[in-house]
Image: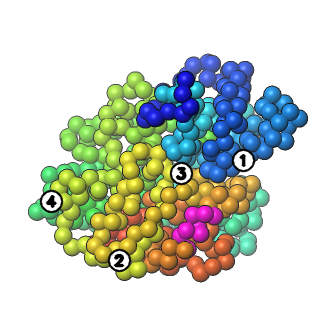
Amino acid sequence: MKEGGTEAPIRHPIDWRNPDFTDTGKLDAELRRVFDICHGCRRCFNLCDSFPRLFDLIDGSETGELDSVDSKDFAPVVDACTLCDMCFMTKCPYVPPHEFNLDFPHLMLRYRVAEKKSHGIGFFDRQIAKTDRNGRLAGKVSGLANWGSKRGNGLTRPLLEGIAGIHRDVELPRFHRKTFAGRSKSAPPRVASDAPASARKAVLYATCFANYNSPGIGVAAQGVLAKNGVETEVVYPECCGMPQFEQGDLESVANRARRIAREMAPWIGKGYDIVALIPSCSLMLKFEWPLILPDDPDVKRLSRATKDITEYIVDIARAEGLADGLSPLPGGVAVHLACHARAQNMGPKAAELLRLLPDTDVSVIERCSGHGGSWGIKRENFEVAIKVGKPVAKKAREAGKAYLASECPLAAKHIVQGVEKLGQEPVPGGRAYHPVELMARAYGISEIGSESGAE
């Protein structure tokens, strides 16, 4: 045995159908095995709140070791894990193929699968995770929905906090009356047939967030690709299941994976690349789905065909070269690399994309924002999420750039709030952008508008 490993980390299929996976005794034994290794290592102490909670739990026990910690006290450690994968990807020296075989995020996922089997998922947690239903309904009354969810609404936000447990101060996504899928059909961009990448064609997997909450990301992506000659089709069967994945509802995730992979299969057969607009979703399609359904041929094929939007544009730049017409962004950009983009092990594609812009200074922020998807909006987690993301907020403010960007729209909102909490000058423009929105601006394709949901 050697201390740590130098081999590339690998992940094993998630054996969620095996009865041993949710067996209480076997799960507890594995938790104790892994927690004891973490206790003796502590490299991950500053990544998220899971590890400080674990180490405080052990240090405050009768013996100062794991043997005197009650298993019922493990729940807060599990709850604080946002499944960002940063411990697995960047810190842990004991991930497979090391013989310790330590995969902390997937162990936390296993605990949640067992909890769902034993106790189910709370009513409001289940409702929050129904992103397609919520997007469709709220979009029909976007003005009212956005008024009700607006931060500072003293009538509705305390009520929402009391009933659904959503912290009254968290900035929530806005809804749009017209989805990205709808916009793409009513006003598709003209494809430049003489552009360098004109031999390419791609399906844009809209994702629930880009479709309902931030269609500007999709419009920008489609515009940039059209400028570079890429024929695109927008296809959105349903959400990738990341919210259900976070809750341990792997049956729901598996069903979604099968349906979406089947719908994408004919497009792949016709030579289309699959491009996801949000890194959490590309992570699901590329990596998590094949671990949940390792024997499904459609899922395997979709995994191989999928790229994140920043990854795809950088690939065009390297393989064919980008179309002319990019202008500088005066004042530069500070770009946050989202955890779920980093977990894809594809390199800092958001930074690489922005460095393609001429004479544009780019500074990189490479640390977790602290948001953690639906975890960070909860009453009991929001202040912790702000604390975890404070180093990112400080770097964003200190960078002094004209633009702030993140591949993850939820992280983007959270960082803006983090800067506000520092009591310093707000982020220029009051918002952060997806990198592809800034590339669209550099091309002069469209001005970056507001996030109003009333459009």
Name the foreground residue: 48 vs 213.
Answer: 48
Local crowd size for mark 2, using a 10 Å CA cut-off: few (<14), some (14–19), many (≥20): many
Residue 196's tag is 4
Name the residue rendered at 55%, 74% in the picture.
397
Name the foreground residue: 82 vs 360.
Answer: 360
Name the residue rendered at 14%, 62% in the picture.
195
- Label 1 sits on residue: 52
Residue 131's tag is 3
Q: Look at the numbered discs 4 and 3 and tell me whether their residues touch, using CB distance below 8 Å.
A: no
Looking at marks 3 and 2 on the same chain, the residue that comes earlier in the sequence is marked by 3
Q: Distance between the residues labelled 2 and 1?
A: 40 Å
Provide the residue span drawn in magenta. Answer: 390-397
Q: Can residue 97 be found in the magenta stretch?
A: no
Local crowd size for mark 4, using a 10 Å CA cut-off: few (<14), some (14–19), many (≥20): many
The x and y percentages for residue 132 are: 50, 50
Q: How far apart are marks 3 and 2 (CA)?
A: 34 Å
Q: Distance between the residues labelled 4 and 3?
A: 37 Å
Residue 396 shows in this picture: yes
> From the image, which quarter does the C terminus lie in?
bottom left
Name the foreground residue: 406 vs 68.
Answer: 68
Residue type pointed to by label 2: Leu
Residue type pointed to by label 1: Pro
Vertical arrangement, residue 430 with respect to residue 310, above or below: below
Residue type pointed to by label 4: Pro
Helix, strand or loop under label 3: helix
Helix, strand or loop under label 4: loop
Looking at marks 4 and 1 on the same chain, the residue that comes earlier in the sequence is marked by 1
Name the foreground residue: 416 vs 17.
Answer: 416
Residue 329's tag is 2
Q: Distance between the residues labelled 2 and 4?
A: 23 Å
The x and y percentages for residue 117 are: 67, 29
Name the residue rendered at 49%, 55% in the picture.
338
